[in-house]
Image (cartoon, rainbow, N blue to C red):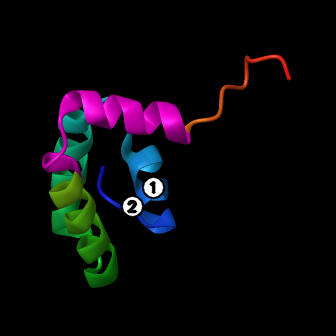
Amino acid sequence: MPDFSPDEINLIFIYGNDGKEKLTKRLTKMLDDAEEDFSVLARGVIEKVSGMTDQAFREMNRDLVPDFDKDE
């Protein structure tokens, strides 16, 4: 799995962690209107996510999202 920065992880959750194709489409769509720093961050996420398998993306999401329904 690629090494995502905290900012990249936040971007993934803001633009949707419901599938890598949906995420990359949403990020690509917003690139036209994004400021330079933000577009660099988004392009990095797109590059990293595009290199992942669907299974690896799902596993990453499972590992990053806390299970709020689990009894502690």
State the residue lying farthest toward the bottom.
Answer: 36
Q: In the shown orientation, is residue 23 left or right of residue 60?
A: left
Identify the residue shown where x is 39% and y is 61%.
4
Q: Nearer the viewer, residue 66 or 37?
A: 66
Q: Nearer the viewer, residue 6 or 60?
A: 60
Where is residue 25? Give x, y as percent.
17, 43
Contact (Cβ within 8 Å) of mark 2 with mark 1: yes
| Residue 17 seen | no
Q: Quadrant of residue 53?
A: top left
Neighbours of disc 1 within 10 Å: few (<14), some (14-19), many (20+) = some
Where is residue 59? Give x, y as percent.
39, 31
Verify whether residue 33 appears in magenta.
Answer: no
- Compare marks 2 and 1 and give the one earlier in the sequence: 2
Label 2 to label 1, Cα distance in Å?
6 Å
Identify the residue shown where x is 30% and y is 36%.
57
Q: Which residues are magenta?
A: 49-64
* Above or below for 33 versus 9: below
Label of residue 65 in the image: none
Kind of residue sitting beneath label 2: Phe
Question: Which mark's residue is nearer the viewer, 2 or 1?
Answer: 2
Kind of residue sitting beneath label 1: Ile
Q: Secondary structure at mark 2?
A: loop
Q: In the shown orientation, is residue 72 left or right of residue 69?
A: right
Indicate the quadrant containing the C terminus: top left, top right, bottom left or bottom right.
top right
Where is residue 30? Give x, y as percent.
23, 57
Label of residue 9 in the image: 1
Q: Nearer the viewer, residue 62 or 45?
A: 62
The prevailing secondary structure element of the residues shown in magenta is helix
Identify the residue shown where x is 25% and y is 72%.
39
Neighbours of disc 2 within 10 Å: few (<14), some (14-19), many (20+) = some
Residue position for label 2: 4
